[in-house]
Image (cartoon, rainbow, N blue to C red):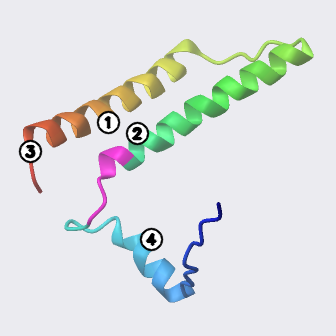
Amino acid sequence: MWIKIKEQSITVEEWDYNMWNIFKDNNDWNEKNVVGFIAFLVMVVFAVLDLVTGYVGKDLIINEFIYDSFTLVVLGCFGIAGLEKFAGVKK
């Protein structure tokens, strides 16, 4: 079974406008989710690098407070965004 996806083309000007639109006060983006997702990606990169260096036989030295701060950012961002969604808080 094949699913056909409509192809979309976007110009550089539209992409540039959409990219900088996230920093405006009234937009459709939830900034807490964006920051939380980026912090989560950094944590995933740390985990993958730790596995790769462990497989090679070397230790990946990461200060504990750096990893813990990323964990708190992820939990804080997604926790606040989840509470806002649950409580029905609107911008």
The residue pinned by badge 4 equals: 19
Where does the magenta region start and end? 28-33
Instruction: Report the disc number at residue 36.
Output: 2
Q: Which residue is at a point 48% across and 37% down the rendered structure image?
A: 39
Q: Position of residue 50 (x, y in %)?
A: 73, 20
User: Could you tell which of marks 4 and 1 lies nearer the N-terminus?
Assistant: 4
Question: Which residue does the numbered mark 1 point to in the structure image?
Answer: 77
Q: Which mark is residue 41?
A: none
Helix, strand or loop at mark 3:
loop
Q: Is residue 25 above or below residue 57?
A: below
* Residue 38 counted in the magenta span: no
Q: Is residue 44 left or right of residue 69?
A: right
Instruction: Give the quadrant of the C terminus.
Output: bottom left
Quick one: label 2 or label 3, which is nearer the N terminus?
A: 2
Measured as percent of width and height from the top left, residue 10 is found at: 54, 84
Give the number of the mark in front: 2 or 3.
3
